[in-house]
Amino acid sequence: MKRLSGTEISKAIKEELKKEVSNLKTRGIHPKLAVILVGDDPASAIYVNSKKRTCEELGIGSLEKKMPAVTTQAELLSVVKALNRDPAVNGILCQVPLPGQCNEQEVIQTIDPEKDVDCFHPYNLGLLTAGIPKYMPCTPFGILQILKRSDCEISGKQVVVLGRSNIVGRPLSILMSLKAWNATVTVCHSRTRNLPEICATADILVVAMGRAKFVTAEFVKKGAVVIDVGTNRIADPAHPKGSRLVGDVDYEGIQGVAAAATPVPGGVGPMTIAMLMYNTINAARFQAGLDRFEL
Ligand code: GUN
């Protein structure tokens, strides 16, 4: 089974993006991303730090708005609106999940769609659904880049997507069914019957359901390509930290069955951040009246 390394593919993409940032800077365009982090969820803090570090690596400006766990919805919306008005900020991202008193959808819908580099706003999801995406949702586009750069043909293939979230499963299934990709897509979820049988029809199986090692060999057709979007922290007394990250797929268990699979960690995760950088660069380009930078 071939290991599809998101770490390596994202490195190559980040080199391309770094060159584009330099190119933009010679033209007086300085891409900048604002990241809002509310509360002290440790996983979110790690993601946000990693996004900031990647901005630095590529020469993209970053601005972190750290807000306490007791932040009200009104306070959060006023920060979003101030960033909408700031012409130096090209992209705005509010890390989710938010504390219970905040309304995630209202925050997403308050972000200016022109600066919505997560592609979470219904306007941008609508453009994508209409087949004319402006921003690409980061995790789905990261998966498409892994497949493209591993010479995995999508056109005409049976794709099964396990999971229907607004962040991964739904936008990915819509994108792959567009004329640009031409897949035949089945979306499965928690109420799907005969899950193993349906998954076993897939040439490409994408798993984004958030259940540790749920997908075993019986879900996988011989020769299939398996993309694991899961990031589940499980207790492991043998590990120095007392826990470790595992995917939704039993990577060892599918070894003799799948032709290729993404590991966890080191698969889809690093791609998501690279695609966020890509969107931030395009945000700066669009706002300067330029067209899309293609990957
Ligand atoms: N939480 C988990 N993934 C993401 C993401 O891609 N963007 C944001 N804003 N929050 C997240």
Image (cartoon, helix red, strand yellow):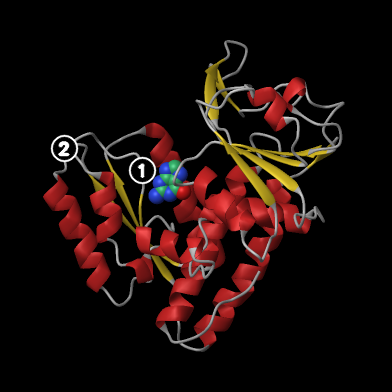
- Residue most extreme to the front: 193
Which residue bears the numbered disc 2?
70
Of residues 90 and 26, the one nearer the viewer is 90
Which residue bears the numbered disc 1?
96
Q: Describe residue 103's horizontal placement relative to residue 238 as left or right.
A: left
Mark closer to the observer (1, 2)? 1
Residue 159 spot, x, y in % from top left: 69, 44
Residue at 50 percent across and 73 percent down: it is 282
Residue at 45 percent across and 66 percent down: it is 127
Of residues 245 and 22, the one nearer the viewer is 245
Residue at 76 percent across and 29 percent down: it is 220
Q: Quarter holding the N terminus?
A: top right
Give the residue type that dot 2 points to: Val
Q: SS at mark 1?
A: loop
Above or below, 85 against 222 in this view is: below
Residue 181 spot, x, y in % from top left: 69, 60
Give the residue type that dot 1 points to: Val
Above or below, 200 against 98 in this view is: above
| Residue 215 in view here | no
Bin the neighbour count of mark 1 within 10 Å (Cα to Cα): few under 14, some 14-19, many 20 and up. few
